């Protein structure tokens, strides 16, 4: 797709960035061609985000040169970068939810009437034509807050077009999209390519990179390992470059010793789920697979009582669990890892230790008075056991990487010694090394006799770690497979409804 | 501590900067010392120790109320009723004195007032789910109105002249005035409540992320309700100290007091969004604002001009905090990026 003969849009030569004591980026050479999708991969902290921050003007390099469109570029702030027609679409979108699509698309540069007022007619019609060019059918007057995340992302891209961006940087753009929405995003990316826009695409999802990218650049420990055309490499090869050794066993799976039934869910309904029945045995990992929006995110919340249960019964080891009471569920031996770390998992301003012990403070207290020594000791044990990378227990949890944050939350629940652990998308948005460790922990816990209920939208991990797989569609369980009978094709076939097919076609 | 935080190449100066930036209380202590030193240079009276003992007496009601508000704010909720509470408590105490001729009943009635108003605020916010800023603003007006109506805008004087009661304000233990002892005991209790108890930990968690706290099994409503009661109780203790000063219930007592308290809480670095702050810093901030006021009074600066100066000082102080917090965040992020880059392969 890329016309390799044309002059590069962006050139980095010998770019170096140091932080006190260490090198975050060691003399990187990089090129982005017009019409090219150039993927960046690497573990967290490998240097990808430092490089993006330099390109977008947030950091200034200590050495090296950058050129945009053949002219030397020295950015002092993000404004300088935007002025050179570089646009970053961040994971957390920076749109104003209460303003309309059109207002957002032209935010900061509204078309004006001769009197200097905002020209609303032009604003709406120009937005409409931009959206049409991208093949999107969205009313420019809709408040952005009412759109789905996928559509908001496309609005961001329309905004890039309105700013006539030549270089678009996308940071994990598909982490919240359904397969149909991913297809639509990729179609839009191809549109951008045809206009000669260069795209830097950062993702942990390697299979996507093979669908969309022309070239891939791998980072490790601040070094650029290699840049290669995508056609000349493989997923296995990329992973080896990223982690620096061969990662032979991503999904460790000890032979399951299935015991007594622990968790019984009978005919449970709640927001987003209908008539759910399932059983989890001691030592068993039960996976629930569903596409985005199929209701898998509600399963854990309703069982645990974080969302209301409108019908049905939940028992744990024979004891009934009350509806709508996380406290009661915890007492009976349930634990829930929610799907959104930042929304209802972490308390960002608090320390690693205080986040870990949040759900088990009673254990360290007599009549409400805390005994810090014991608390510190147990937290330190978990930091070691889960190999959480943190400079100290006092570090604010917001400064940890996604993978380490997720391990802090795992520790929070393991500390309570639950009988059954409900995990909702525990590996979303974290790097492959941390993923492997979380799979290892799950296997270890199941081996110790815990029951695990594992909800995920990613097929490979479900196939990799579950003993039994249930498939969910529109809030209902529609199929069940044993470990040996489940395949990717069967899961997808069961999970895709007519509705989802329609979205795929529309994209 | 510093060995844990410091990145490998921090020199002596940078290390001090890091300590200053990361320690709220220490940075305020530096500010307090600066303010005192400044006044000592320009106003000779400020060099006498008696001035400071007097200052401690005067700031004690503010300190008590501010500590209560800080605890509540840690959970992300506001209480604007403290000013009106100062008046209401005074009225209730002295009125009970006059009706029962019993000092202890008066004091008890005053404290009970705080408990009841706190519980009412707590009910509105946690049971009915009303927004605390507007709720307590409404309560602030309602209580003040109640005080005006009940007193018909005349002060209520203690007819028994309970000298034992006024000692709560005027008695000294050695050079130490009694009201500051009350205040410091409450600061210490609040400090331990916030840092050493399950309740305190839950409070920080709720202010930092109420959803996460709920999913972790914390009873968010109960904790917040209790905090409103504590805040009400602290406001009535402040009212108790204030009333002991004149042995009179004034309908106009504490006008604007809630803003003075809130100013101290914010200067103490507590986040208005909740989850961040500590009572020691609030107490220090009360001292800073008190010292500035005291210094200007001694220099016989006109009260109207005082207001101007206090306003400007507040702005400077908030700016000082911002610089400090930014420095802290930058140092942490740099150290983190440095470690990430330094640590090599995450799987190794």
Image (tube, coloured by chain):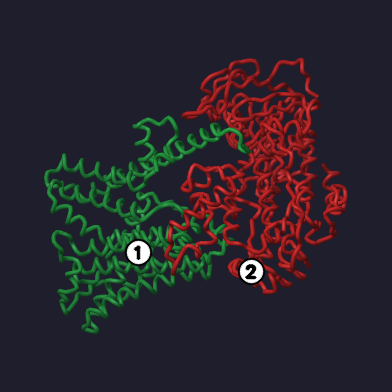
Chain colours: A red, B green
Residue B82: assigned label: 1
Question: Image check: B292 left or right of A208?
Answer: left
Q: In front of the other: label 1 or label 2?
A: 2
A496 is higher (above) or lower (below) than A451: above
Q: Residue at x 87, y 47 (%)?
A: A489
Percent across and percent down for residue A349 are 49, 49
Residue B148, position as x, y percentages in the image = 31, 71
Residue A410 seen by the camera: yes
Locate residue A326 relative to residue B140 in the image: left or right.
Answer: right
Q: Is residue B52 above or below residue B122?
A: above
- Foreground of the two, A309 or A432: A432
Q: Quadrant of the C terminus of chain B?
A: top right
> Residue A334, located in which quarter of the rendered image?
bottom right
- Residue at 73%, 55% (x, y): give it: A455
Q: Quadrant of the N terminus of chain B?
A: top left
Q: Secondary structure at mark 2?
A: loop
- Tell whether label 2 touches label 1 (CB within 8 Å): no
Chain containing mark 1: B
Q: Are marks 1 and 2 on the same chain?
A: no
The chain identifier of the residue carrying mark 2 reads A
- How far across and how far down the image is residue A410, in percent? 61, 53
Judged left or right of residue B129, residue A224 is right
Residue B76 visible in the displayed image: no
Q: Position of residue B113 (x, y in %)?
A: 34, 74
Rounded to the nearest whole Å, what is the CA distance between mark 1 and mark 2? 36 Å
Element under label 1? helix
Which residue is tagged 2?
A324
Count of marks overlaid on the render? 2
């Amino acid at each position: 797709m890329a016309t390799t003969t044309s002059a590069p849009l962006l050139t980095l030569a010998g770019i170096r960035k140091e932080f006190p004591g260490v090198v975050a980026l060691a003399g990187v050479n990089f090129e982005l061609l017009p019409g090219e999708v150039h993927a960046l991969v690497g573990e967290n902290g490998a240097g990808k985000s430092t490089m993006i921050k330099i390109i977008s003007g947030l950091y200034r390099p200590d050495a090296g040169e950058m050129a945009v469109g053949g002219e030397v570029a020295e950015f002092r702030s993000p404004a300088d970068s935007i002025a050179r027609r570089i646009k970053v679409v961040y994971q957390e979108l920076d749109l104003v939810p209460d303003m309309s699509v059109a207002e957002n698309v032209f935010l900061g540069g509204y078309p004006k009437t001769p009197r200097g007022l905002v020209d609303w007619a032009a604003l709406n019609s120009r937005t409409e034509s931009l959206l049409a060019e991208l093949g999107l059918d969205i009313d420019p007057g809709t408040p952005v807050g009412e759109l789905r995340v996928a559509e908001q992302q496309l609005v961001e891209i329309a905004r890039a077009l309105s700013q006539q961006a030549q270089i678009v940087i996308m940071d994990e753009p598909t982490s919240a999209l359904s397969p149909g929405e991913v297809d639509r995003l990729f179609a839009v990316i191809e549109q951008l390519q045809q206009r000669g826009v260069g795209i830097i695409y950062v993702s942990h999802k390697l299979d996507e990179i093979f669908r969309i990218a022309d070239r891939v650049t791998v980072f490790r420990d601040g070094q650029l390992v290699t840049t290669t055309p995508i056609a000349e490499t493989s997923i296995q090869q990329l992973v080896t470059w990223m982690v620096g050794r061969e990662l032979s066993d991503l999904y460790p799976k000890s032979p399951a010793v299935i015991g007594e039934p622990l968790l019984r869910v009978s005919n449970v309904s709640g927001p987003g789920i209908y008539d759910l029945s399932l059983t989890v045995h001691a030592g068993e990992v039960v996976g629930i697979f569903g596409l985005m929006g199929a209701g898998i995110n509600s399963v854990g919340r309703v069982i645990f009582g974080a969302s209301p249960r409108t019908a049905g019964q939940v028992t744990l080891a024979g004891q009934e669990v009350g509806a709508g009471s996380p406290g009661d569920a915890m007492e009976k031996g349930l634990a829930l890892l929610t799907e959104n770390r930042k929304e209802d998992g972490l308390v960002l301003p608090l320390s690693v230790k205080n986040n870990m012990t949040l759900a088990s403070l009673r254990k360290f207290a007599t009549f409400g008075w805390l005994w810090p020594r014991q608390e510190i000791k147990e937290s330190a044990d978990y930091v070691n056991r889960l190999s959480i990378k943190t400079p100290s227990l006092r570090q604010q949890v917001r400064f940890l990487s996604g993978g380490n944050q997720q391990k802090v939350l795992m520790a929070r629940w393991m500390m309570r010694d639950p009988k059954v652990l409900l995990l909702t998308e525990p590996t979303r948005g974290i790097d492959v090394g941390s993923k492997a460790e979380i799979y290892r922990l799950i296997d270890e816990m199941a081996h110790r006799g815990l029951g695990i209920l594992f909800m995920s939208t990613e097929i490979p991990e479900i196939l990799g770690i579950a003993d039994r797989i249930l498939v969910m569609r529109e809030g209902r369980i529609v199929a069940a497979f044993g470990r040996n009978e489940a395949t990717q094709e069967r899961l997808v076939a069961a999970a895709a409804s007519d509705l989802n097919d329609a979205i795929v076609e529309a994209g | 501590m510093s060995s844990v935080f410091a990145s490998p190449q921090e020199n002596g100066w940078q290390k001090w900067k890091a300590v200053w930036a990361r320690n709220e209380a220490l940075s305020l202590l530096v500010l307090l010392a600066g303010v005192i030193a400044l006044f000592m240079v320009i106003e000779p009276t400020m060099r006498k120790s008696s001035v400071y003992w007097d200052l401690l007496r005067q700031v004690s009601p503010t300190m008590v109320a501010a500590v209560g508000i800080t605890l509540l704010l840690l959970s992300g909720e506001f209480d604007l009723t403290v000013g009106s509470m100062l008046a209401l408590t005074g009225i209730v105490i002295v009125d009970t004195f006059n009706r029962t001729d019993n000092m202890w009943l008066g004091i008890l009635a005053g404290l009970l007032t705080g408990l009841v108003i706190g519980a009412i605020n707590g009910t509105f916010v946690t049971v009915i789910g009303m927004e605390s800023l507007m709720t307590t603003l409404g309560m602030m007006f309602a209580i003040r109105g109640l005080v005006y109506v009940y007193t018909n805008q005349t002060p209520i004087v203690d007819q028994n002249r309970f000298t034992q009661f006024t000692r709560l304000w005027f008695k000294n233990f050695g050079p130490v005035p009694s009201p500051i002892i009350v205040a410091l005991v409450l600061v210490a209790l609040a400090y331990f409540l916030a840092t050493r108890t399950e309740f305190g930990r839950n409070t920080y968690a709720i202010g930092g992320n109420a959803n996460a706290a709920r999913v972790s099994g914390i009873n968010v409503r109960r904790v917040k309700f209790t905090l409103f009661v504590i805040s009400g109780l602290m406001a009535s203790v402040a009212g108790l100290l204030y009333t002991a000063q004149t042995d009179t219930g004034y309908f106009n007592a504490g006008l604007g007091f809630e803003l003075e308290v809130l100013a101290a809480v914010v200067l103490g670095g507590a986040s208005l969004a909740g989850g961040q702050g500590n009572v020691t810093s609030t107490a220090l901030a009360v001292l800073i604002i008190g010292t500035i006021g005291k210094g200007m009074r001694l220099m016989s600066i006109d009260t109207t001009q005082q207001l101007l100066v206090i306003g400007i000082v507040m702005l400077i102080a908030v700016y000082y905090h911002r610089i400090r917090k930014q420095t802290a965040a930058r140092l942490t992020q740099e150290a983190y990026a440095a470690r990430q880059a330094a640590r090599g392969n995450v799987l190794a």
